[in-house]
Amino acid sequence: MPKTRSIFLYPLSLVYGLITGIRNFLFNAGVLKSHEFSIPVICVGNIAAGGTGKTPHTEYLAELLQKDFRVAVLSRGYKRKTSGFLIAGNGSSVSDIGDEPLQICRKFPGVTVAVDRDRVHGVKEILNAFPETSVIILDDGFQHRRLVPGLAILLTGFSNLIINDHMLPYGNLRESRHNIHRADIILITKSPGDISPIQRRLIVRDMQKRPYQNLYFTSLSYGEPAAVFEGDRPAVNFTKDETGILLVTGIADPAGLKEYLSARTGEIVHISFGDHHNFNQADIEKIIGAFSEIRAQHKYIITTEKDSVRLREFTNIAEPFRSAFYYIPVRIWFLNDDKEEFDNLIIDYVRKNKRNNRIS
C-alpha cells in the first residue's frame, strides 16, 4: 500500500539511504564478512517494509519442498518477547516465537521452524540440532547481508513496485532499489488475475532485470473461512443481502482481503490495527462491541490467518462471540502458467546444490 508522504521526511530518507548504501558497499567489497553454508539456503525477502506477502510465499516453498527434502524455516520472530535461538514446538506461543513462525509451525508439523535474530547463528544451531536438514528457508532475510543465500527471492507488491518507491522514512524502502540485482528471482506479488500482456511486458521492462534473474507474477487466492477456535462450527454462508461482517486485521496491507469480502456481503465494518498487533483485552471488548452493533441476519467476525494465531490465545471469549470468529486462509498462485517453471527451478536448485553456491 502506498505510503502517505511528507516532503519534510525526504532529507531523512537521503541520510538513511547513505547509511544503508555504505553498509552494502562494505559487504560488497568484502570489508564486512558474509558467511555461506554447505547446504542450500533460500532467502524470501523484500526491500520494502512489509505488505508483500512473505509468509504465504514462504509457506508455498515449505509445502513444495517438504515432499522430498528435510526442510527448516528460520525467521527473526518479529515482536516476540524472547531472545536468542529457539525452536518452535507444540507448546510455543506468540510471545515465544512470533505469530508468523507459529503459524508455519502449526501448518507444517514436519518442517523444523526456528527463530533467531542472528541468521548465521540460527543456521548453525539448526544444523547442530538437525544435521539431516536438506534445505533452510530464510523468512525475511534479504537485508541480512552477513549470510549469503544460495537462492535469493525478492518480493515486490504489484500496487507499489520497488522501482516506484523511495527510501524510508519518506517511502517504504529499507535500502536502495538498485539492490534488486542481488536477487536471483523477482516475484511481483498480489498481482490482479486479469493483468494484460501489455501490463506484464511494461513491468518486466521497467524492473530492468538482469539476464540471470527470473521474474514471475503471483496473486493471492482466498480460501473458505475456517474457525479461529476449536469446536464444530457451521460453514460461513455469504449472502449479499443478509450477511454482515466485522473484519479485524493486524497486517500491513488488508486492502485485498477487504475488497474480497466486500463483494460477498451487504454490510462490512473494518477494525484495522497495525502490523503484528499484540491484541489485548481492551481490543477484544472493542471487537465484541462493534460486532454486537451489526444487525444482519447472519454475521461473522472475519480475520486473517496471521491474526487468528494471536487471537486464539484469548481463551476467555464467551459464546456466542467465540463461535463467530473465523479466518480466511490465503495461498499464492502463479499467473501465466509459470508455476511449473518456478517449482522446477526451486527443486533443481535444492537437489543439485550440495554446497550453498550462488546459482547465478
Image (cartoon, rainbow, N blue to C red):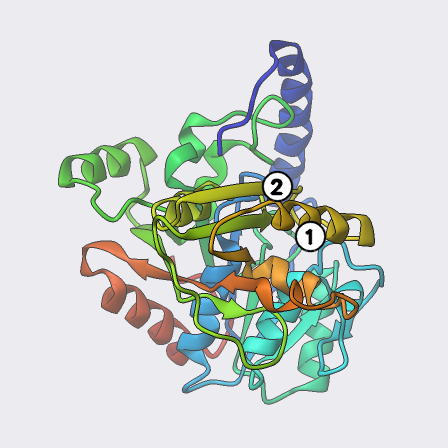
Specify whether 96 is left or right of 63. Answer: right
Specify the amino acid type for callout 2.
Ser
Of callouts 1 and 2, the N-terminal one: 2
Q: Is residue 283 above or below residue 199?
A: below
Q: Is residue 68 above or below residue 337?
A: below
Q: What residue appears at the point 58 percent right and 84 percent down from the top-left corner?
A: 109
Q: Nearer the viewer, residue 164 or 314?
A: 314
Q: What residue appears at the point 69 percent right and 62 percent down from the top-left corner?
A: 311
Q: Nearer the viewer, residue 124 or 239?
A: 239
Q: Nearer the viewer, residue 214 or 95?
A: 95
Residue 203 is situated, as x and y percent measured from the top left of the image, at: 27, 35
Residue 323 is situated, as x and y percent measured from the top left of the image, at: 60, 69
Specify the amino acid type for callout 1.
Ile
Residue 118 is situated, as x and y percent measured from the top left of the image, at: 74, 60
Residue 297 is situated, as x and y percent measured from the top left of the image, at: 47, 55
Q: Rounded to the nearest whole Å, what is the CA distance between mark 1 and mark 2?
A: 14 Å
Identify the element where label 1 is drawn.
helix
Identify the element where label 2 is drawn.
strand
Identify residue for label 2: 272
The disc placed on residue 56 is: none
The image quarter containing residue 237 is bottom left
Q: What residue appears at the point 63 percent right and 73 percent down from the top-left corner?
A: 229
Identify residue for label 1: 288
| Residue 96 appearing in the image | yes
- Quadrant where the image shows the C terminus: bottom left
Q: Nearer the viewer, residue 318 or 72?
A: 318
| Mark 2 neighbour class, 10 Å CA radius: few under 14, some 14 to 19, many 20 or more | some
